[in-house]
Amino acid sequence: MDDQNKNLILATALSFIVILVWFVLFPPPEPEPRVDQTASVSSSVDENGVATVPQAAGTTIDTEAPQAETREDALAAAPRVAIDTPRLTGSVSVLGGRIDDLSLKDYRTELSPDAPIVTMLSPVDGPHAYYALYGWAAGAGLTADLVPGPNTVWTVTSGETLTPENPVTLSWNNGTGLTFTRQISVDDDYMFDITQEVQNTGGETVSLAPYGIIARHGEPEDLKNFFILHEGAVAMADGELFETDYDDFETAADHETTNVTGNGWTGFTDHYWMTTLIPQPGSPFEFSTFHDTARDIYQTTTKLQTVTLAAGETASFTTQLFAGAKEWEAVRDYQRNGIEGFIDSIDWGWFFFLTKPIFWLLHELNILIGNMGWSIIALTLIIKAVLFPLAYKSYVSMAKMKELQPQMEALKERAGDDRQKLQQGMMELYKKEKVNPAAGCLPILLQIPIFFSLYKVIFVTIELRHAPWLGPFQDLSAPDPTSILNLFGLLGNASPEPGSIMALVFIGILPLLLGISMWLQQKLNPAPTDPTQKMVFAWLPWVFMFMLGGFASGLVIYWIANNTITFIQQYSIMRSQGYKPDVFGNIRGSFNRKADAATKPKTGGKDKS
């Protein structure tokens, strides 16, 4: 086996093994049906079955909510203040002052324009409850019923609808000299500002601490449980990122509290959406994340430092709540405005040093071009241009290896069965001619981390969700929607369901083009003379074709573009070195096994033109 074919087989086999292991070990699972959860906000249950939320040391807030059969019934159970912004719609419940009804105007659950918009938050006593709750934890001089909590009925003192121009103010008097107000404002995107104020008009000194809670009843309905994606709790504490999967949550009884001295935030992250509690930067606070297993409630909390309030004094604290899509521009701008590490709420993965710049470049190209599919192709061109110096050396080395073929054949004849003598002779020949036989592997090996980084970008970033290219390719984060079964959409019948066996067998046009592009790339070189090598090379493009058929179409577009550019580069460089690859001759040879068996395959030769 000559070294050129050894290198090509090694590099191709490594790529194949990595993708095969990834495909087998970490296939995207089918979404599992979820049971409606209707438990109330809690971290433990007392002997009477009433849920409790621990706040300050030695204090609790009790809440018990009835069960509603539908989300609409739950929304109607308490008076509400509407939320209406350019990108959000929903309402705030005056019962507890919860932000528990929120939907995203710009995103739909499916690609169809008639699909419902995405629901972010839902009320406590309805199915799949998910909400943000603010309040005060009672300290010295107070009991839980004298501070606002989950069951407090607030009075709307200003604002009928929460908009970016019009905040809403709620108030509550505890009847013993403490007046609480809460002003809620919202920007044009996904950030709420919550200002909690307490005024002591009584005669006693009291202590209390403001807190925030995000509670989620049960796991998300569309939980992916996929290795490449983190879903669950996410937090930043003084520059350190914390990620907790749902099956790794500590219990309410055993959880620990993390103290943050500077900047930080905590919340829940889904595939594309996130809710986050953000105390004012520079304000010390503590946060905790836990799972109430008895009620199946996942919860993350923040509690600011306890304030002591003498008679006549007032205290005010402002925190923020992010609730929306993890759009790169929005998250980046919030980080620039002081939320430390907020861009890392997007799951960039182990190759973050590649995924971040790759996404940034893809995003900028999309702004310039206006089409994510063409932007992926443009990104491929740029990546290939950056790697071109290395590719050039590699292909020049491969051309020189072809030039040495007659001398290598002569060495084999002289060495006979003495493999040590053959290897020594080859090493001397490589050294004399200044040829590196391993150079051909490097460009292919470098594609592996780039491939996985782009896969990560396409899978986790919302900018690729429902991003169109052309024709039937209207969602580059989804597999190719076409199929051989319906002649790639020419027939009226629908394509097989993505992820099914039928979809795996009856692939779409993009995987087919991928296989063809890999096959043509092979034809730049003659088929190996060794029968085993020849069989491996013959099957490899079509194995890759079926394996990648279920991958995101955006990733397959990248690979097709990469193969096409590689073909052009390699052909041009080989021509520049005086050799003309006999592409058509090699193609004809692959369809003529008898001729291959009877004659020596064409190897190309010096370009006489």
Image (cartoon, rainbow, N blue to C red):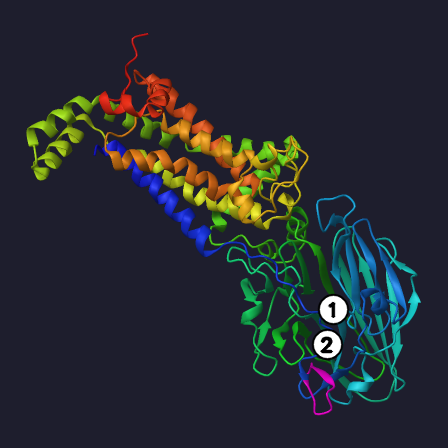
Numbered disc total: 2
Image quadrant where one finds the C terminus: top left
Q: Amino acid at mark 1?
A: Ala
Asked whether disc 2 touches disc 1, contact meaning CB atoms under 8 Å apart, the reply is: yes
Q: Relative to residue 363, is residue 597 drawn left or right? A: left
Q: Residue 14, how many percent across, how many down?
A: 35, 44
Residue at 11% across, 32% down: 425
Callout 2: helix, strand or loop?
loop
Q: Amino acid at mark 2?
A: Ala
Q: Residue 7: which disc? A: none
Q: Is residue 237 above or below residue 581?
A: below
Mark 2 Cα within 10 Å, few/some/many (few <14, many 20+)? many
Q: Relative to residue 17, is residue 214 drawn left or right? A: right
Q: Residue 319, how many percent across, how many down?
A: 73, 66
Q: As rendered, which of 464 and 540 lies closer to the eye?
A: 540
Q: Residue 389, how many percent across, how many down?
A: 38, 29
Residue at 62% across, 41% down: 495
- Asked whether residue 383 appears in the rendered view, the answer is no
Image quadrant where one finds the N terminus: top left
Q: Is residue 200 above or below residue 364?
A: below
Q: Residue 129: which disc? A: 1
Q: Quadrant of residue 111?
A: top right
Q: Is residue 108 above or below residue 316?
A: above
Callout 1: helix, strand or loop?
loop
- Can residue 51 be found in the magenta stretch? yes
- Can residue 94 be found in the magenta stretch? no
Residue topped by disc 2: 39
Nearest to N terminus: mark 2 or mark 1: 2
Q: Relative to residue 345, is residue 144 drawn left or right? A: right
Range of magenta residues: 45-56
Q: Relative to residue 145, is residue 445 drawn left or right? A: left
